[in-house]
Amino acid sequence: MSLRRARVSRDEHRDLGQRPWRPLVEHSLLDQRGFTLIELLVVIIVLGLLVGLVGPRLFGRVGQSKQAAARAQIELLGAALDQYRLDVGGYPNAGQGLDALNRNPNVNNWNGPYLKKAVPKDPWGNQYKYRCCPGQNGEYDLWSEGADGAPGGEGENADITSWDSSQK
């Protein structure tokens, strides 16, 4: 298409009965090229490699974040237990359990609830374990058994406890 043809005024086109945009549209439609199959396969392979290399690293962080959430919940439950002890004079016994933080277990000076909501489950959907008066590792023991829900374990399956400060 020449420059002269493109510089024809609208009035001239109207007089000639032509549409000024038609040659541009026809020309651009004929010149369009799509991607070849090889180009598409190369892009798909590169994306597959990226997902294969980066994906496992991201999914490994999910387990770490669940462990961090469990540690934070144990700390908050520990603070609520300490407040309970200040009010009542001792920690709830194993029979009363953590529910004593939300419901009065018929003890004097109970000023609860000590939690805004019900006692949470750990990030894996299991109940937190509680042993008291005394616990085996302190005045009370509070722990989660990790992803596998069984004592012990390593990595994401490791127990998260109130008494082991090296876990932080």
Image: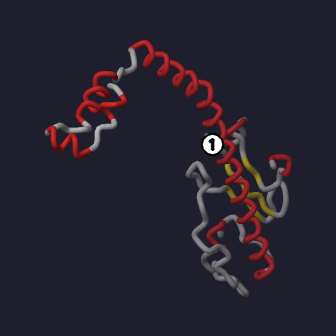
Q: In this view, does 72 lie to the left or right of 167?
A: left
Looking at the image, residue 84 sits to the left or right of residue 29; the answer is: right
Q: Which residue is nearer to you in this view: 34 or 160?
A: 34
**Vertical arrangement, residue 96 with respect to residue 105, above or below:** above
> Residue 99: where, in percent of width, then height?
62, 70
Q: Which residue is drawn at 81% across and 63% down?
A: 134
For numbered disc 1, what is the local secondary structure? helix
Looking at the image, which is closer to me, 42 or 112?
A: 42
State the residue lying farthest toward the left: 17
Instruction: Identify whether 82 is placed above or below 110.
Output: above
Front residue of 155/11: it is: 11
Q: In which quarter of the image is residue 31?
A: top left
Residue 120: x and y, percent? 60, 62
Locate residue 20, reporting x and y percent. 25, 38
Q: Which residue is drawn at 81% across and 49% down?
A: 168
Which residue sits at x=50%, y=18%?
Answer: 45
Mark 1: amino acid: Val
Quarter of the image where the N terminus is located: top left
In which quarter of the view is residue 49 placed?
Answer: top right
Q: Name the residue under label 1.
A: 62
Residue at horizontal 70%, vertical 84%? 110
Where in the figure is residue 24, as x and y percent of width and height? Answer: 29, 32
Q: In this view, does 124 lie above or below 43?
A: below
